[in-house]
Image (cartoon, grey):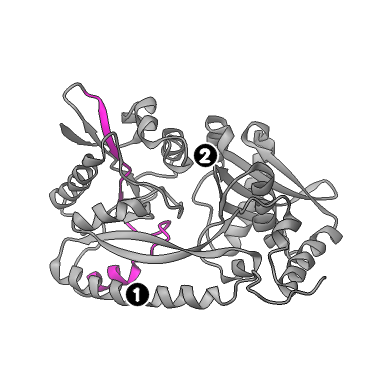
Amino acid sequence: MRAVVSDGIAEFAARDWNALVGALYPFLRHEFLLASETNGCVSADSGWSPRHIGLFDDKNKLLGAMPLYEKTHSWGEFVFDWGWAQAYREAGLDYYPKLVSAAPFTPAPSARLFVSDQELKPVLLQAALAYAKECDHSSLHVLFPHEDELGVLEETGLKLRKDCQFHWHNHDYRSFDDFLGTFSSKKRKKVRRDRRHVTEAGIRFRWLTGRELDTAIWADVYQLISLTFLRRGSMPYFSFDFFVEVSQRMPENILVVLAEQNRQPTAAAVFYVSDAVLYGRYWGSDSQYNALHFETCYYQGIDFCIANGKKIFEPGTQGEHKISRGFTPVSTWSAHWLARPEFFAAVVNYLEAEEQHVDRYIDAVNTHSPYRIQEADQPD
């Protein structure tokens, strides 16, 4: 068996890569990674140099795969290590380049070690660590791994970091009103008020799948997304050409919720769809509208999940405002190895204290859940 470090996903046959990754998680499929690389979103120029690892047998059959990138910054990761980089700088050391196993610009948990045999997972990790040492990289980071990978990550010498996101779970709701029926009266009224603001503004919505998205519609959507990014002082990580290509290569995995006022696009949200999960990724609007963000990014997504039998809705990172809309805290993880023992020891101490803080935070936000808990509920 041999481990090969590639310079791009094109070095792997799509059929072989996807046979390991599977169809349940869109962000690491060969089509998604290829579109991100061929359109320059993921490249040396963007600070994301592909270094994907493949395990091959003596007949050149792909037995294992690990998405991996050489990073020259920490943007687009959603697991923040800027403080660690600063500590290296203050010590006169280089933190970059580092190695990161992740779905580019995508804080959505999934497997990161794809193998034909579970016993090959530590082999993949050891290959990544060996490459980090060989190239004198400062560190190796595995971002948003699946929980069933945490054991092998720890056993191979990485240290776990805990965080949380807010996800929505579909308990076989028959309708949005059925879902709202689980809320306390006060919280239910708040959501209905949000939705009423949007309806009264004359805004209507269309759900568009990849097959319904032509370049003209993508031009409108991308402009709306770019306007919102520009208000925050940046541009979208993914380009217009990327969205056009990925919707052609993976039409069943793309959903755009398009908000229109007087039949003109006024806001849009881009989602990705798997068999059981809806992923919210990007949002944009041409102006500020009362509650339009909540409607486009959250309520429309919940409506879609109920209508299409999706069990989980992951809208992205951060945002305590999601709690009152029915999203609940879910633990997420990352795993880290630093080459220098003195820095690694300090990081381990930090992670242990941070995990206690995250646990307290999850307990605190759970007290603000909108769901009824043995209370007398009043009709609206």
Q: Secondary structure at mark 1?
A: helix
Look at the image and tell me whether residue 150 can be seen: yes
Q: Which residue is mark 2?
A: 242
Residue 304, compared with residue 17, is above or below; it is below
User: Residue 89, position in %: x, y?
Assistant: 24, 70
Comparing 66 with 24, the one in front is 24
Q: Amino acid at mark 1?
A: Glu
How crowded pointer 2 is (Cα within 10 Å; few <14, some 14-19, many 20+) is rated as many
Q: CA distance from mark 1 to mark 2?
A: 36 Å
Q: Quadrant of residue 319?
A: bottom right
**Quadrant of image for the N terminus:** top left
Residue at point 43%, 78% (across, down) = 360
Query: Where does the C terminus fall, quadrant-wise?
Result: bottom right
Asked if 25 appears above or below 261 in the picture, the reply is above
Q: For the view shown, which residue lies furthest in the top direction?
A: 59
The residue range painted magenta reads 60-89
> For the residue carrying disc 1, how many other residues have a C-alpha within 10 Å: few (<14), some (14-19), or many (20+)?
some
Q: Amino acid at mark 2?
A: Phe
Q: Is residue 94 left or right of residue 377?
A: left
Q: Which residue is tagged 1? A: 354
Residue 92 at least partly seen: no
As for residue 53 lying within the magenta part, the answer is no
Answer left or right for 181 relative to 154. right
* Residue 357 spot, x, y in % from top left: 39, 77
Q: Which of pointers 1 and 2 lies earlier in the amino acid sequence?
A: 2
Q: Position of residue 195 (x, y in %)?
A: 77, 61
Left or right? Give the position of 304 relative to 129: right
